[in-house]
Image (spheres, helix red, strand yellow):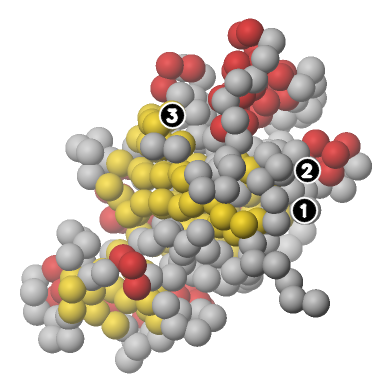
Amino acid sequence: MKLASLKSGRDGELLVVSKDLRTAVKSGSIAPTMQYALDNWDAVHPQLESLYQALNLGRASDAFPFDMNSLAAPLPRSYQYLDGAAYASHIQRNRAARGEAVPDDFFQKPLVYQGISHGFMAWNEDVRLPSDDLGIDFEAEIAAITDDVPMGVTAEQAGKHIRLFVLLNDVSLRSLIPAELKRSFGFLTGKPASSMGPIAVTPDELGDLWDGSLVSGIMQCWVRGELVGKINTGIDTPFHYGDLIAHVAQTRNFEPGTLVALGTVSNEDESVGCGCIGEIRALEILKTGKAVTPFFKFGDGVRIEHFDRDGNSLFGWIDQRFMAATPVES
């Protein structure tokens, strides 16, 4: 099943979207918002699935042409956003370029931080920031969205609590991050609001790309119109979604609508490119001693899209520009 949220108020208006992304139908009589659907998943999922099947067969009476430009993020506000650094080559390259090693327990415990869970941007919304001297970067990711997750859940059990997957651009400000990490209290100002792709999909919609642990396929990334990455998302990580969920759930329950991402996608094979500028620069430093690829300046753009083995787009795409924030009036 494919779901999206029409721009409406703070939380959007839930849509069921056809498999071919050509038509959609409002689901207000079943679930007015994505959060409502997640809060009541067992009750509403069969009804939403029936509506999805009717839409695909051309039998949904209130169907209308699907317009991605009318969409907000699928889940504009989340109760919790957890992001990891699970792809080993990403963290190893970035730390090596700074002359640092990965933590001693890197392959035993996942690295996870808690980011901004409110105000996720739409797929085509300009990313507005106070300055373009902050080392503006993107990070291409796939995030899982959970239902209620009980404290103490195991990694094997955790995958059963994943209800949806979305494409994610985790915006990073590289000039601010190193100093924040050295203070040993984690990311804060270096991680502003992130954005989601337009379409949320249920695990069954992914077919054999979802093996219960990871989502396979190819993540393609463009920076300033240039293709910089064609990355296999289903390999080269010692941790999967269940591992991250279980790690955090050691001490807390999850509310429905919790986002869990594995971090910037990355492969050991350098020839496939990278899912962020930071990693591109890290490889340049390791090879030549100098980073030459610039971070984003205002007016620059990024595009992120994930494809299945047949070249079909799974989540729509993220296509954004970085722009100056509107000054605060005195």
What residue sits right under mark 3 in the picture?
228
Q: Residues within 10 Å of mark 2 (few under 14, many from 20)?
A: some
Could you tell whether 96 is left or right of 33 in the image? Answer: right
The residue beneath circle 1 is 189
Crowd class of label 3 (few under 14; some 14 to 19; many from 20; radius 10 Å): some
Q: Residue furthest bottom?
A: 29
Q: Nearer the viewer, residue 56 or 248?
A: 56
Identity of the residue drawn at 57% across and 25% down: 293
Instruction: Indicate the secondary structure of the residue bearing disc 2.
Output: loop
* For residue 114, side relative to residue 81 (left or right): right
Q: Earlier in the sequence, mark 1 or mark 2?
A: 2
Are the residues at dot 1 and dot 2 in contact (C-beta closer than 8 Å)?
Answer: yes
**Sequence order check: which comes first, mark 3 or mark 2?**
2
Query: Callout 1: helix, strand or loop?
Result: loop
Please tell me whether residue 181 is drawn above or below residue 144 in the rendered image.
above
Spatial CA span between label 3 and label 2? 24 Å
The outermost residue toward the left is: 58
| Rendered-image quadrant of the C terminus | bottom right
Does dot 3 land on a helix, a strand or a loop? strand
Type of residue at label 1?
Thr
What residue sits 34% from the left and 37% below the top?
217
Q: Whole-Å distance between the Cαs marked 1 and 2?
A: 7 Å
Q: How many marks?
A: 3
The residue lying furthest to the right in this view is 183
Image spot of residue 52 (x, y percent):
22, 72
Residue 328 visible in this rendered orientation of the protein:
yes
Which badge, 3 or 1, comes first in the chain's sequence?
Answer: 1
Residue 249 visible from this viewpoint:
no
Residue carrying label 2: 176
* Residue 46 falls in image quadrant: bottom left
Position of the N terminus by quadrant:
bottom left
